[in-house]
Image (spheres, rainbow, N blue to C red):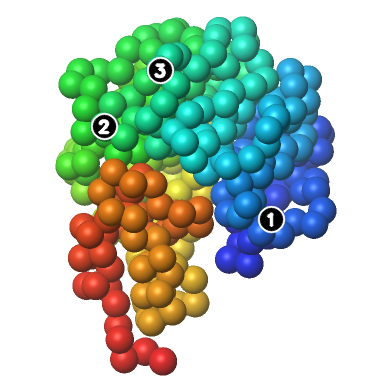
Amino acid sequence: LGLKADGSIAAWGDNFHGQTDIPPSNAEFMSVAGGGTHSLGLTADGLIVAWGNNSYDQTEVPTPNIEFIDVAAGNSHSLGLRADGSILAWGRNIYGQANVPEPNSGFVAVAAGGNDSLSGHSLGLKADGSIVAWGSNSSGLRNVPAPNAGFVAIAAGGSHSLGLKADGSIVAWGSNSSGQRNVPAPNTDFVGIAAGASFSMGLKVNGSIVVWGDNSFNQADVPGPNADFIGIAAGNDHSLGLKGHFGDLNLDGFVDWEDHAEFSACLAGPGVLPPLGCDLARLRGHWSVDLADYARFQRLFDPDVE
């Protein structure tokens, strides 16, 4: 799945269950998530649209379908984060991946994993920088390494998980069957993470991508030139990288006054969730958009571009 600047979604690949058939009117989307054989889209008004395989009710969004700010899709289950910091989970629940632990509050990001219908785990990032994990505990998936603090982003793979720390390092746990937990050195300066079935991805502050783990389908071979990336995503056995310029929020090739206006609208302060549509404003990979992001934006900003 790809989210366009105009709020529409582009989808390609396997469509056996209709997972690439985006429902009409395909507009005003702010976020997307692709699961095993189902897809999720979050609209500007906080509504989740779901399509594709519904064998385990993974496309049956619980009511009331309102006030969502983030979505995540596992192999056969789905997660939605509400504006009040609570998580809704639905779909396959064989390992309890849809049973959000109490207290169900204070969450700022979600991630869903699993590489087949007989697996599944979920992650929730708290505003205090800790991670809550539930569902399958195969290979210690629920055992977040200590200290469970200082995390700013999360990713869930087939049978492993990743956490990005505020210092730019990555912590990995769960299965290491293909080396997907072996973060290459130097483990520094990361601003983004993504996890596939048995491989992992990290986006560096310099715009390069690092990939490690399974490479059976060349998913770890980043095409050259490995530069100017601003976003990453991982499927089961494939990888995606979005090219652009950090700070270019409207993707027009410049970091100009239009981007300044968009960034100002996203600036929410420490500990406060930014509005929907602010993913590219998270210049340090954090869930928040605060003055540290603004300081970096100012270094990228060119006021003379018209």
SS type, badge 3 = loop
Nearer-N-terminus badge (3/2)? 3
What amino acid is found at the position of numbered circle 1 in the picture?
Ala
Measured from the top left, where is residue 131 in percent x and y? 33, 25
Exactly how many numbered labels are in the figure?
3
Query: Which residue is rendered at x = 51% and y = 49% of the image?
Result: 240
Question: Taking 292 as reference, is 235 left or right?
Answer: right
Measured from the top left, where is residue 269 in percent x and y? 28, 54
Q: Report if residue 193 is visible in the image.
A: yes
Measured from the top left, where is residue 276 in percent x and y? 50, 53
User: Closer to the camera, 216 or 143?
Assistant: 143
Nearer-N-terminus badge (1/3)? 1
What amino acid is found at the position of numbered circle 2 in the picture?
Asp
In the rendered image of this protein, does residue 90 appear above or below residue 201? above
SS type, badge 1 = strand
Question: Which label sits in the foreground, 3 or 2?
Answer: 3
Residue 10 image label: 1
- Circles 2, 1 touching at the beta carbon (< 8 Å): no
To which residue does mark 3 refer? Answer: 103
To which residue does mark 2 refer? Answer: 128
- Circles 3, 2 touching at the beta carbon (< 8 Å): no
